[in-house]
């Protein structure tokens, strides 16, 4: 899954670029929205695949804890690491001439981007890499440490799409992403395999500063505030 998802995202992105002129020649906002549409489509298709696999086993998302709310320890743990990640990301916004408040109160296409990134990453990636993959490793007889570490590494590798920014920038994204995924995996286990705390924490992380950082990475608009 760690490498299959980037491949699916690459295919979806290529199809979008070939079929939608605005994805290549549109305004910076249009190009950015179409750029994040590729990963969104691929991830929701993967979730549908998980639903199909579970149905074949006479199971559902409920059985792997997707709708389970966990406990207070899981919430504190998941939100704590989300807050650390958000704080780390926020420091880049002043360098882009973007007010910190814009991360929490976006408008225009930035609001659409924040919701698309937050909802897709928060739900799809947590279903795929925490609820489903960790449950698969548990059912295969792996201990809790392996259940956290292996899907966490796969989660980091799944962000291989950033390799187009160069190996070192990608490594700077993949390593902390893998660590964050592991911490949300711990939260999933702490909450007795309840996924909601990790979903909410992941949503908050990906819907705040990350859309702005991704926007400047994709459009090359560093140093000026987009209209």
Image: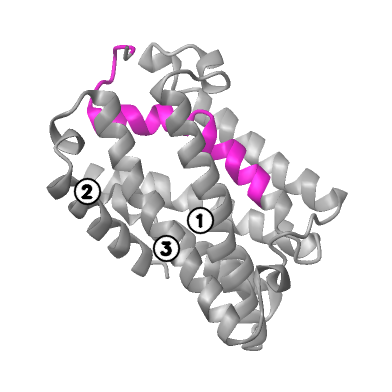
Is 74 displayed left or right of 156 in the figure?
Answer: right
Q: Dot 1: what SS?
A: helix
Q: Is residue 18 magenta?
A: no
Residue 65 at x, y percent in the picture: 72, 66
Q: Which residue is mark 2?
A: 16
Q: Which residue is mark 3?
A: 45
Please identify, in this view, whether the residue under mark 2 or under mark 1 is nearer the observer: 2
Which residue is painted at 22% across and 48% down in the image?
16
138, 62: nearer the viewer = 62
Label of residue 142 in the image = none
Using the numbered discs, state the Cα–Cα distance from disc 1 to disc 3 in whole angstroms. 22 Å
Is 14 displayed left or right of 62 in the figure?
Answer: left
Which residue is painted at 61% across and 87% down in the image?
57
Q: Is residue 223 magenta?
A: yes
Q: Which residue is mark 1?
A: 178
Instruction: Using the rendered view, name the quadrant where residue 145 is placed.
Output: bottom right
Which residue is painted at 54% across and 64% down in the image?
129
Q: How many marks?
A: 3
Decide whether the magenta segment is chiefly helix, strand or loop.
Answer: helix
146 vs 6: above or below = below
Residue 201 at x, y percent in the picture: 65, 43
Q: Earlier in the sequence, mark 2 or mark 1?
A: 2
Which residue is painted at 79% across and 52% down in the image?
74
Q: Earlier in the sequence, mark 3 or mark 2?
A: 2
């Amino acid at each position: 899954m760690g490498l299959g998802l980037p491949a699916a995202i690459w295919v979806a992105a290529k199809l979008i670029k070939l079929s939608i002129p605005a994805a290549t020649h549109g305004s910076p906002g249009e190009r950015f929205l179409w750029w994040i549409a590729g990963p969104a489509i691929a991830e929701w298709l993967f979730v549908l695949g998980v639903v199909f696999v579970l149905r074949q086993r006479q199971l559902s998302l409920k059985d792997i804890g997707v709708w389970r709310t966990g406990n207070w320890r899981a919430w504190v743990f998941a939100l704590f690491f989300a807050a650390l990640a958000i704080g780390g990301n926020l420091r880049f916004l002043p360098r882009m001439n973007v007010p910190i408040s814009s991360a929490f109160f976006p408008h225009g296409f930035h609001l659409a981007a924040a919701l698309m990134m937050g909802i897709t990453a928060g739900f799809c990636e947590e279903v795929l890499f925490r609820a489903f993959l960790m449950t698969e490793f548990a059912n295969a007889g792996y201990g809790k440490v392996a259940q956290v570490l292996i899907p966490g590494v796969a989660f980091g590798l799944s962000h291989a799409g950033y390799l187009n920014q160069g190996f070192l920038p990608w490594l700077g994204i993949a390593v902390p992403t893998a660590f964050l995924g592991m911490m949300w995996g711990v939260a999933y286990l702490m909450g007795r395999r309840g996924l909601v705390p990790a979903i909410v924490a992941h949503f908050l992380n990906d819907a705040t500063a990350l859309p702005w950082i991704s926007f400047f990475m994709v459009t090359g608009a560093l140093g000026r505030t987009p209209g």
